[in-house]
């Protein structure tokens, strides 16, 4: 079995991390657009263009997420390092699949909100799904640090230089 993530898997990991963090952190334009839209007000073309940056970055996450899912199913992933306790290995596995579910669910809910004006989709997008994404990211970075400095595994290396 492979001992590292493949180069395409590594590129996708870091590219998608950047796109997702962009959409989580720079929300001003989309928040303004969403507020006006749900109040039934008209948006200026500039407001629509600014909000569309969020939309296209988010659709990028959806498309790249699907490609990455196919790659994972075809190429597989390296086994969890042996130093990691079995319970935490299971937690890591579940949280990685939860990320994949979010790569699809967050953009789909966003599409429901933006293109179909669906309030429930907007609520799910900006409430529970956003929160779950943040929680996973915080736990994920924490996990990467524990791997690196406490268990001293090669986890970070196989997602960077390989
Ligand atoms: C990885 C993908 C995405 C992430 C991480 C993301 C994240 C966010 C965040 C953090 C907000 C602001 C939430 C708040 O008010 O606190 C937001 C709002 C919004 N997003 Fe996204 N988004 C993504 C993709 C998309 C896509 C693909 C679309 C549409 C095609 C979209 C449409 C919207 C809309 C319409 C709002 C405003 C909703 C409202 O005001 O009620 N998002 N998104
Ligand atoms: C939005 C941010 C991020 C997301 C959504 C994310 C998502 C993922 C996912 C789904 C995996 C599972 C492997 C795969 O299928 O590709 C993974 C693995 C990994 N991530 Fe991230 N990641 C993010 C940020 C980070 C950051 C900031 C770090 C470093 C501190 C990091 C370090 C790693 C490492 C080391 C692995 C490999 C774990 C292993 O060997 O099993 N990730 N990430």
Image (cartoon, rainbow, N blue to C red):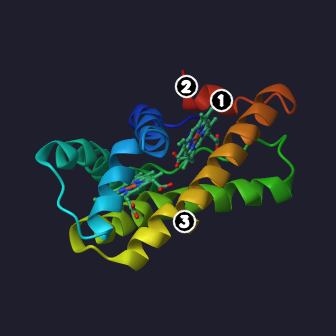
Query: What x and y, as percent, mark residue 147?
Result: 78, 34
Of the pair 90 and 56, the residue shown nearer to us: 56
Mark seen at residue 127: 3
Proximity of marks 1 and 2: CB atoms separated by less than 8 Å: yes
Query: At x 27% / y 73%, what residue is drawn?
Result: 117
Query: At x 65% / y 58%, what residue is drawn?
Result: 95
Of the pair 84 and 45, the residue shown nearer to us: 45
Query: At x 48% / y 45%, what residue is drawn?
Result: 24
Query: What x and y, as percent, mark residue 37?
Result: 27, 64
Assign a secondary structure to mark 1: helix
Q: Earlier in the sequence, mark 3 or mark 2?
A: 3
Query: What x and y, as percent, mark residue 100?
Result: 49, 59
Q: Earlier in the sequence, mark 1 or mark 3?
A: 3
Mark seen at residue 156: 1
Quadrant of the snapshot with the C terminus: top right
Q: Residues within 10 Å of mark 1 (few under 14, many from 20)?
A: some
Quadrant of the snapshot with the N terminus: top right
Proximity of marks 3 and 2: CB atoms separated by less than 8 Å: no
Could you tell whether 33 is left or right of 49 in the image? right
Query: At x 35% / y 51%, what residue is drawn?
Result: 32
Assign a secondary structure to mark 3: loop
Could you tell whether 7 is left or right of 42 in the image? right
Query: What x and y, as percent, mark residue 35?
Result: 36, 60
The quarter of the picture showing ligand 1: bottom left
Where is mark 2, residue-wise?
A: 160
Could you give the CA–CA distance between mark 3 and mark 2, rounded to whole angstroms? 32 Å
Which circle, 3 or 2, is nearer the viewer?
3
The answer to whether the beta carbon of the residue marked 3 is less than 8 Å from any atom of ligand 1 is no
Q: Residues within 10 Å of mark 2 (few under 14, many from 20)?
A: some
The answer to whether the beta carbon of the residue marked 2 is less than 8 Å from any atom of ligand 2 is yes
Quadrant in the rendering for residue 66: bottom left
């Amino acid at each position: 079995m492979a001992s590292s993530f493949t180069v395409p898997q590594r590129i996708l990991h870091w590219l998608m991390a950047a796109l997702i963090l962009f959409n989580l952190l720079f929300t001003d334009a989309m928040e303004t657009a969403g507020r006006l839209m749900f109040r039934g007000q008209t948006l200026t073309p500039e407001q629509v263009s600014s909000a569309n940056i969020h939309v296209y970055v988010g659709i990028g996450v959806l498309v790249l997420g699907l490609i990455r899912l196919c790659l994972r199913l075809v190429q597989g992933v390296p086994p969890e390092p042996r130093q990691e306790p079995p319970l935490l290995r299971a937690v890591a596995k579940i949280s990685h699949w939860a990320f994949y579910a979010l790569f699809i669910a967050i953009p789909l809910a966003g599409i429901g909100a933006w293109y179909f004006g669906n309030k429930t989709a907007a609520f799910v997008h900006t409430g529970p799904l956003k929160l779950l994404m943040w929680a996973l990211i915080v736990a994920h970075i924490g996990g990467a640090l524990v791997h690196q400095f406490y268990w001293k595994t090669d986890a970070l290396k196989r997602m960077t230089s390989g």
